[in-house]
Amino acid sequence: MNSDNFSHRRSNSRVYPARLKRSIASCIRYKLILSGLMIFACAVLMIIKFGHLNAYHSVQILSKYRNTKEELEKIAALSELVNKTQSYNANFTKVALVMSKTRSDDLRWLRDYLQTQTDNTPFIYTMDRKPETELLSAHSSRGREASAYLSFIVDLYDELPPYSIFLHANPDQWHNDLFGPKTSNVLHSLRREAVDARGYLNLRCANNPGCPIHINPNSPTQADIDNNDVRAHFPSIYKEIFGEDAHVPEHIGGICCAQFAVSRARIWQRPKSDYIRMLNWMDKKSIPLVDDYGVGWVFETLWHVVFGMEAIDCPIYEQCRCDNYGWCGPLPSGKTLTAIAAPQKKQLKYRRG
C-alpha cells in the first residue's frame, strides 16, 4: 500500500470528524438561539394575551365586587326598614310613609332619610309575583301602588298615625316638580300644617297633567266606546267604588301622579268598609273591565275624591307651593303669599266614619 495515499486518507479521516463536530456545534447553537427566540416570542405573546385577559377579568371582578357590595347595602337597608315597621307604635309615630316595592327598587334613600326623621315609620308592601316575604303583603296583586295604599288603610285603620304619606319607592320621580326629582327633598320641605288644614294634598303642584279636567265620566268619546276603553265604563266603575248611591260628577280633574299626604282625620271620614269595598272592586270586580294598569289609572284619577276633595281639585300653582312647602314669594309681581295655617286643635276632627 502506498504510504502517501494512506497518509492522505488518514488525514482526511481526521478532518471530517472535526468539521462534523463544528457543524453540529453550530447547528446546536443556532437551534438554541432560535429556540430562545421562539420561547421569548411565545412568552411575550403569552404576557400580552394573559395580561389583557387579566385586565379584563380584573374589571369583571371589580364590577362584580361593586355589584355585590351594592346588593348587600340594599339588603341591609331593607332589613333596617323592616325592623322599623315591626317596631311601629302609634303613640310615637307621627308620619307613616307608605309605598309599594318591587325587587328592583332601591330603598337606601328611605333608610338615609329616616335617620333624621325619627317620628316616621315606613310601611312597604311587596308587589312582585314572587313576593319579598319580609315585607308587608297587599290585599290584591292588581292596581300597582293603589293596592298597597288601600291595604295600609285597611290594615292600620284603627291605629293610624296623625299623617300618612303615600309614595313611589324609587328615590327620583319625574313628577316631583319643586325641589328636583328626589322625593327626600320633597318630604323634608312638606308642611304638616297644610295637611291638617286641607286634609288631603298632592305632593305635586304643577297642574298638568290632570287639571283642569282629566275625564268626563258621563260623556265618553266614540273612540272610547269603540275601543272599550275604561273611560267608557267610568260611571259604573265610580258607583262600584263609592257605592250605588254616589253621584257621578260630570267632570273630574286632579293633579297627577299618586303621591300625596292625608291626615288621619280625613281618612277616618270614611268608614273602614268603604276602603274594603274599594279593595274588593280592585281585586275581583274590576277584572272584566280593566287590566292591572287600568286599575291603577282609575285610582290615580280618583284619589282626591276618595279623600273627600271636590271632583275638580286643582289648586293654583303658586298658592300650592306656598301652602305645601312654604315657598311664598315674592312672586314676579312683587306679591308675597300667605301659607295656609293649621286649624286650631278644637277644630280638628278625629271622629271615625
Image (spheres, helix red, strand yellow):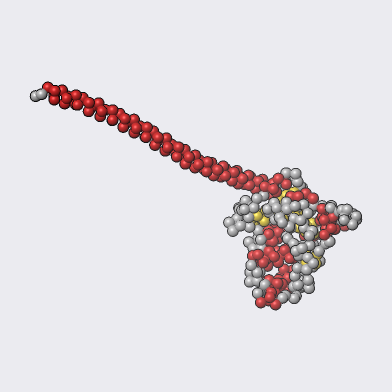
Quadrant position of the N terminus in the picture:
top left
Q: Is residue 42 left or right of residue 239?
A: left
**Quadrant hosting residue 136:** bottom right
Whether residue 352 is visible, yes or no, is: no
Occupied quadrant, residue 317: bottom right
- Residue 14 lies, with reference to residue 248, above or below; the image says above
Give 78 or 59, whichever is nearer the viewer: 59
Q: Is residue 80 visible?
A: yes
Which residue lies at the image location 63% right of the left edge and 47% below the top edge? Answer: 74
Percent position (x, y) of residue 70?
A: 61, 45
Q: Is residue 61 above or below residue 326?
A: above
Is residue 33 found left or right of 106 in the rendered image? left
Figure label count: 0
Pick whichever, 160 or 124, lies toward us: 124
Tell me the residue at 78%/60% (across/down).
206
- Relative to 20, residue 172 above or below: below
Quadrant of the rendered image containing residue 10: top left
Residue farthest left in this picture: 1
Rendered-image quadrant of the C terminus = bottom right
Residue drawn at x 67%, y 49% as measured from the top left: 107
Residue positioned 57% across, 44% down in the render: 63
Residue 321 image point, x, y percent:
82, 56
The percent coordinates of residue 138 (x first, y second) are 65, 58
Q: Position of residue 281 (x, y in %)?
A: 68, 67
